[in-house]
Image: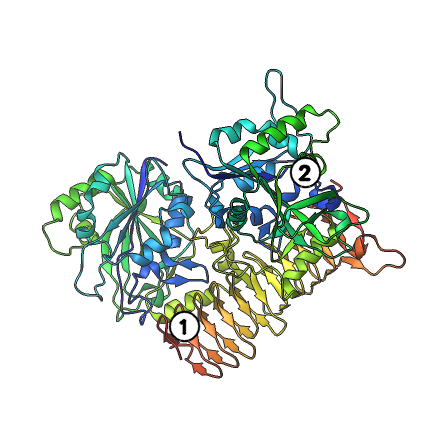
Amino acid sequence: MLKKECIAMLLAGGQGSRLGCLTRNIAKPAVSFGGKYRIIDFSLSNCTNSNIDTVGVLTQYKPFLLNSYIGMGSAWDLDNTFGGVHILPPYVGETQGSWYKGTANAIYQNMDFIHHYNPDYVLIISGDHIYKMDYSAMLKFHKEKESEVTISTVEVAWEEAPRLGIMTVDENSRILKFTEKPSEPESKLASMGVYIFDWSVLKDALLEDEGDLESDNDFGKNVIPRLLRQGTKLFAFKFQGYWRDVGTIESYYDANMELLNGANSLDIFDPEFRIFSNEGILSPQFVGSKARIENSLVSNGCTILGEVSNSILAPGVYVGEGAKVKDSIILHHTKIHENCFVQRAIVGENAEIMSQSCIGVQAKGHLEQAGITVVQDHQVIPQGSVIKEGRNVYRTR
Amino acid sequence: MHSVIGLIFGNTRSDILQGLAQDRPIAAVPFGGRYRLLDFALSSMVNSGIRTVGLVTPHHYRPVLDHLGAGKDFSLDRKAGGLFILPGAIHGLIGDKSKFRIKDICLNIEFLQKDFSENVVISYCNQVYNINYRDALEFHNQKQADITLIYKETDDPLDMSGRVILYIGKDQHVHKLQEKYEDDPTEQAQPYFVDMLIIRRTLLLDIIQGYKCIENIDLLDALRDNLTTLKVYGYNFTAYIGRIDSIKDYFDRNMDLFKPEIRKELFLSRDRIHTKIRDNPPTKYGSKAKVSNSLLASGCCIDGEVENSILSRGVVIKPGCMIKNSIIMQKCIIGKNAVLENVILDKFVEVNEGNVLKGSENNPLVLYKKTVV
């Protein structure tokens, strides 16, 4: 029987509610990032670059755009005769089946899929982090340590630690303690949400977790702590490099801006570790004779007639004459018309900002989300509008 | 449109493009930042619903295959039909003006024999356009024509030099084909053949059968021989068709892309021009970048001044550069403070720090692939 050494299960069902109006209509992994990419591109490209050719993508929340974007995975060279990308939505059977209740439950419900490929190892990743990682190095570590479960970790700043899963390890990298979102973290070693399980260990753990009615069916909260208690061999793989969780508007904005300014940020220009994406058919970008662009990333199909600085423009964006776009992230096919002023804003896909409008005008007092203004996708901002900084503009029609 | 297949002649090399077509056929000459010339011919066929296309290539077809692969980016990786690579005959002279050589089709006759379709759309590939053949095909079927020649009308003698002039009677019937010579200026608009035609497949097979013994005969000559016995019609196209027949043409057609109406017709209409997708990152503009009236592909790093220029993918412009009226192809690196004006750089050219390269508008300076200056 054909079998695989290692397959990946990519958790892409989360809503990402902290991203506010950016994820009103699309799942978080499908949110645009860094101009032409979508967040899931990084995880899928990592799989390709790590020679993992079988990926199950677990979707649940507003999956249409995500599903159509992934297609059969050919954009990431993941269209194979045995293997490839499989979209795994929740389903019902005669007696079983329901919405995915948690990360562990999502995998539990798709155990048949894993059985089909009968792998030795299962890599569990999530579709909402920005990083470049060769999973094969982690798999090598997993085998060398004769580990049963390996968790990839990264050192974070102390102030970030309470948001993440934090672990304590011994000198041999064996995990002694794992706390999900600790109020008083003991170390700076955070879980990246990347796990390698021996398939047999994962199978037993999932069955046991499903039997536990108290459980929230979550890897970080329930499965990993239970395995630790039972004395399973868990090891921490130390990842060196850039890793960002883009779970909030602020962290999403900062991670984007780091592409422009950060010296130790993600190298998207590296020809040996390429980030693939599903591109549309677009023309080269046109820069008009009165345009001025500095310190920015501009994608294919853009037409720039105005001024753009410190900004990231996704494919097909239009910036009209006299318009000024500053410190902003403009997503796919959005139009910013003549003489608009857009500052420190994230403008959603296919939005349209009519002429003479000001987005992100200075406001007094306490600012929500660090003063970043967010406009929802497909929203049309009428001519001459003034929107104060830090506001969320939800779609009205 | 399953009753139609396409046939593109992409096998001519030429000395008229000063080295741009030296190691590649004209079909594979890069154009407009992201494209190669054959993209326009191929995309127009695909966008017209043609799902089977044969591409005649020269015997050295690495650049063409590198670009097309299995035709995936053109939606031509099909079980039924798809893209067929048809290696043409080895022709002796590089400067041969002939376009549709029967010998080339004859070598690949199975492509035509194995198909079941009624008609074949044939085109050459030294032109830039975004057209849809649907209306022309409907006209062809309605007239029950043997052959429909696509033409445009112009009074510009420049457009017409070297073209074939059609003499069209009532009912769009073509009764004479005449080569246009340069010493024959005319004031009035004349219809000229734009190197695209629709022909019945079985008729094409008959013509090949009848003429294959004649060395190097062009399909158009065979047609001319039989003009009186065949039902040959002309169909008028009004679309933009930019021909590239000299290095000046190449330069000017690229510069035409700065005209909004032409850019709109080529790139922003409902039918899109497909090309090989390379998944480059977005283009990065540094804090010293100053770009105006230019077209840029993805993956460039711009830190200098760029004006009226076209930059292909992955071009690096270092600080202090002044690039004006130039076409810079893939992966060129322009060192600090270099000055370029009216220059065409083929792929992978490196210009070292401080160098000044200037051509003239009518005679742009061309640097070959991988040159280091």
The chain ID associated with circle 2 is A
Query: Would you place residue A240 above or below residue A47 in this image?
Result: below
Q: Is residue A165 visible?
A: yes
Label 1: element kind:
loop
Q: Residues within 10 Å of mark 1 (few under 14, many from 20)?
A: many
Colour scheme of this structure image?
rainbow
- In the picture, which quadrant includes the C terminus of chain A? top right
| Residue A324, percent from left and from top | 70, 64
Residue type, mark 1 in image: Val
What x and y, as percent, mark residue A203?
A: 58, 30
Secondary structure of the residue carrying tag 2 is helix
- Residue sitting nearer the eye, A232 or A395: A232
Q: Residue furthest right?
A: A365
The chain under label 1 reads B
Q: Residue A243 sits in which quadrant?
A: bottom right
Q: Is residue A295 left or right of residue B356?
A: right
Mark in front: 2 vs 1: 2
Q: Name the disc covering residue B349, or none.
A: 1
The reply, left or right, for residue A115 in relation to residue B226 is: right
CA gap, disc 2 to disc 1? 59 Å
Vertical relation: B192 (above or below) A25: below
| Residue in the image at 47% along x and 58% along y | A272
Q: Residue at x 36, y 51 (%)?
A: B68
In this rendered view, identify the residue nearer to me: B175 or A78.
Answer: A78
Picture quadrant where residue B27 is located: bottom left
Which residue is identified by label 2? Answer: A228
| Percent position of residue B60, x then y | 25, 59
**Quadrant of the snapshot with the N terminus of chain A:** top left
Q: Looking at the picture, which amino acid does disc 2 mark?
A: Leu
